[in-house]
Image (cartoon, helix red, strand yellow):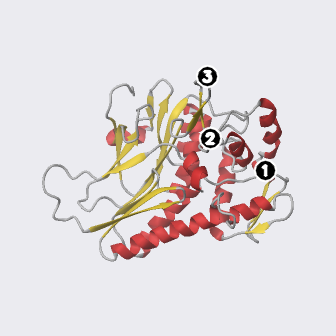
């Protein structure tokens, strides 16, 4: 997943463990915080309670396993085997990979192909985030667009096989695999009766339970127009939920004329999406679906994107290119804008 996965989820979200100026709560349990570079990004796993060290290590091992199944950059991953056999034969995959690709295709259908896991040829052509980043010609884009069509991804649920029906097709699950991995982390928490904890996969955050002192977790949302990472535009309070964000600022390419091209590509046009949003956050109880939705919403734009997310049972925090903030009414006062320049 390396660069590809970093490229899809492009808004950094920070866990803010706020304890105030006084002493730590007497109810707070000891915690373990483990970090590692997995799935192309920095991962933080925090676990409270007994067996916390073993549980945190198990979560990191699980993320490593998922990366080896779904990475676009590891020659022996299942996704690479599927791509190498495009137009040749179906490839049997694990239940994990099948579920992720199946969910990606589901959201491709819901967005009329805007969120399309077969966008790989276009991503490779632009190369944004790599040393080969450039603006391809209209002719080059026209050549690869026919390869991008989720309807040519043939899934066989009984056999657990994936077949790309056209030679040259490339699927890339970087826009959804981190969400699946975060959900798996929480499943491991539950297996070990962990009451409190969180998994942060490069800004893809899922929190389990509330904090040990019974207060809500506070998640800081990156300011998409700030000069550096870590500058926040708002804070959301939550428990037992995931938040995933896509935006136009995390990875981009600037041409010789100073024009900036971000990496979230519209598979219909072949160019970076221009739907009026600079950031789209989705909040819900499933990180896999929140992951797919954040990119889908960004591609669809504010009105259609919010409609889709809320139809799926998720809440949104959207920032338009005019720096207007749109949020789901259900969030109420759980989300607060903390800097000037953004208007609700």
Q: Earlier in the sequence, mark 3 or mark 2?
A: 2
Q: Which mark is residue 257?
A: 3
First along the sequence among labels 2 and 1: 2
Specify the quadrant that holds the N terminus: bottom right
Q: Say few, some or many: other residues with alpha carbon within 10 Å of mark 2 (under 14 / 14 to 19 / 20 or more).
A: many
Q: Which mark identifies residue 128?
A: 2
Q: Residue drawn at (57%, 24%), measured in percent from left and top?
A: 258
> Residue at image x 65%, y 58%?
73
Q: Nearer the viewer, mark 2 or mark 1?
A: 2
Q: Position of residue 112 (x, y in %)?
A: 71, 41
Reading the image, the residue beneath label 1 is 151
Compare residues 285 and 89 and report the one nearer the observer: 89
Q: CB of mark 3 within 8 Å of CB of mark 2?
A: no
Residue 199 percent coordinates (x, y):
42, 60
The percent position of residue 222, horizontal first and vertical second, equals 41, 40
Look at the image and tell me whether residue 311 can be seen.
Answer: no
Relative side of 151 to 63, left or right: right
């Amino acid at each position: 997943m390396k660069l590809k996965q970093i490229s899809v989820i492009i808004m950094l979200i920070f866990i803010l463990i706020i304890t105030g100026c006084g002493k730590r709560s007497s109810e707070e349990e000891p915690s373990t915080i483990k970090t590692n570079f997995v799935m192309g990004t920095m991962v933080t796993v925090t676990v409270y309670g007994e067996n916390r060290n073993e549980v945190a290590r198990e979560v990191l091992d699980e993320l490593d396993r998922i990366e080896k199944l779904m990475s676009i950059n590891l020659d022996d991953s299942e996704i690479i085997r599927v791509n190498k056999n495009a137009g040749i034969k179906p490839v049997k995959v694990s239940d994990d990979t099948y579920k992720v690709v199946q969910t990606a295709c589901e959201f491709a259908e819901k967005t009329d192909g805007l969120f399309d896991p077969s966008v790989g040829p276009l991503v490779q052509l632009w190369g944004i985030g790599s040393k080969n980043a450039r603006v391809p010609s209209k002719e080059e884009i026209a050549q690869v667009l026919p390869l991008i069509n989720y309807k040519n991804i043939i899934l066989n649920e009984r056999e657990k096989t994936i077949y790309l029906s056209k030679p040259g097709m490339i699927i890339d699950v970087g826009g959804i695999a981190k969400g699946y991995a975060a959900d798996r982390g929480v499943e491991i928490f539950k297996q070990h009766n962990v009451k409190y904890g969180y998994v942060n996969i490069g800004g893809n955050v899922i929190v389990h339970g509330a904090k040990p002192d019974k207060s809500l977790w506070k998640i800081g949302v990156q300011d998409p127009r700030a000069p550096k990472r870590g500058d926040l535009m708002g804070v959301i309070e939550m428990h037992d939920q995931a938040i995933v964000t896509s935006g136009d600022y995390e990875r981009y390419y600037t041409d010789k004329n100073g024009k900036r091209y971000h990496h979230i590509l519209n598979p219909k046009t072949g160019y970076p999406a221009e739907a009026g949003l600079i950031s789209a956050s989705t909040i819900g109880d499933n990180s896999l679906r929140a992951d797919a939705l954040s990119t889908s919403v960004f591609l669809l734009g504010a009105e259609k994107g919010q409609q889709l997310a809320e139809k799926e049972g998720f809440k949104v925090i959207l920032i338009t290119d005019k720096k207007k903030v749109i949020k789901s009414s259900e969030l109420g006062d759980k989300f607060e804008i903390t800097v000037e320049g953004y208007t609700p």
